[in-house]
Amino acid sequence: MQVSPALAQLLADRRKAFNGKVASLRSRNPGFDTAALSAFLIDPLDPLLARVLEARPDGGAAFVDAGFDMALALVEHGWAGNGPRGTIIGHLWRELAPAMAPMIAANPRETIGALSNSAIKLAGLPEVRLADWIACLRQLGASASSPQELRSLAIIAAWRSGAAHLRAAALAAAINPELACAIVGAAAGAEWSALTERFAAQRWWTPDGSTPANGHRLGRFIGFGGDLAEPPELSVIDDNFILSSGGKHFMLEADGFGAVLRRAGADYAAAAKPATPARLDAQNQLRTDDRMVPCDWPVNGLMLAVTSDSMAVVSSHSHAVMVFPRAMP
């Protein structure tokens, strides 16, 4: 398959410089996949170039310079190609980037860098709903006024898509208030300042009432692509949950939009207070502050930990953890 005449000419004009970059990269990484690089230039870079040229006829050179450098980095680190990692970046460049062609044309290196780097960071968190994140950016990304605002938009969209660890960053993001309200699913006419106050006061509150009453279940056995080698132990420190499994420790962060596990230090985990045995009623439910939560694990080996606004449960029979609000917002 051949590239378009526009891309062919731009590559020809830069052949010496681009060949030098590839040669330099291969000298330090002999296994560099030149076939994957060629495939990335054909698709998705070439179709995106066409959209960039529609938005800015004189923007092709800057876009190809930035795009080629990004392609080199993505291929070198395994983020381009037919594997799962390449699929994520492919969706981003094919489905999302075309909607933001004008911004890419004006600031190619910053914009495609912001998008690609955000996707790579989120791809390392299996609990984040990447499809929701891409859909949100496809719908609202073009409304960003600059690459800087696009980064803020991406952070808030990631938070709404389950990246609970980005909660503070999302609430502090510099962004058009109306755009921020739209990202989190608030009703028309809502005020971002009022929303941030409510979010700060109630971890489990969401503007659209989507908080799951039974919370979130996450964590998987390492043999199935997860991080947990054995059923985890649960503890609490500084109003935060800690999971420990197979010598590894993770902080569990959760709110109304989702929950994630991120690595934590051994010293931090050692200072945490262990969970206590949990009790179930006759219908296999856990009592919270204002309701009962179903639990499908046997009471034997069931451990419970509590913070100011959340509860978490683990079982010796499972590699998962359940985390849910003590009281519905």
Image (tube, rainbow, N blue to C red):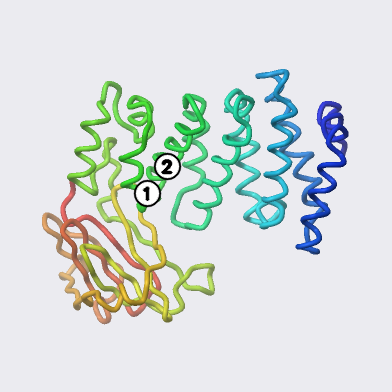
Instruction: Give the residue at the far left of this rendering.
Output: 290
For image coordinates 27% across by 56% down, the residue present is 214
Which amino acid, by three-letter code, is at mark 2? Ile
Q: CA distance from mark 2 to mark 1?
A: 7 Å
- Based on the displayed image, in which of its 4 quarters is residue 53 positioned? top right
Q: Residues within 10 Å of mark 2 (few under 14, many from 20)?
A: many
Secondary structure, mark 1, is helix
Q: Is residue 63 left or right of residue 258?
A: right
Dot 1 alpha-carbon crowd within 10 angstroms: few under 14, some 14 to 19, many 20 or more = some
> Circle 2 is placed at which residue position?
155
Q: Are marks 2 and 1 in contact (CB under 8 Å)?
A: yes
Residue that mark 1 sits on: 166
Question: Which of the numbered marks, if any, corresponds to residue 237?
Answer: none
The residue depicted at 30 percent of the width and 22 percent of the height is 188
Residue 37 shown left or right of residue 13 in the figure: left
16 to the left or right of 93: right
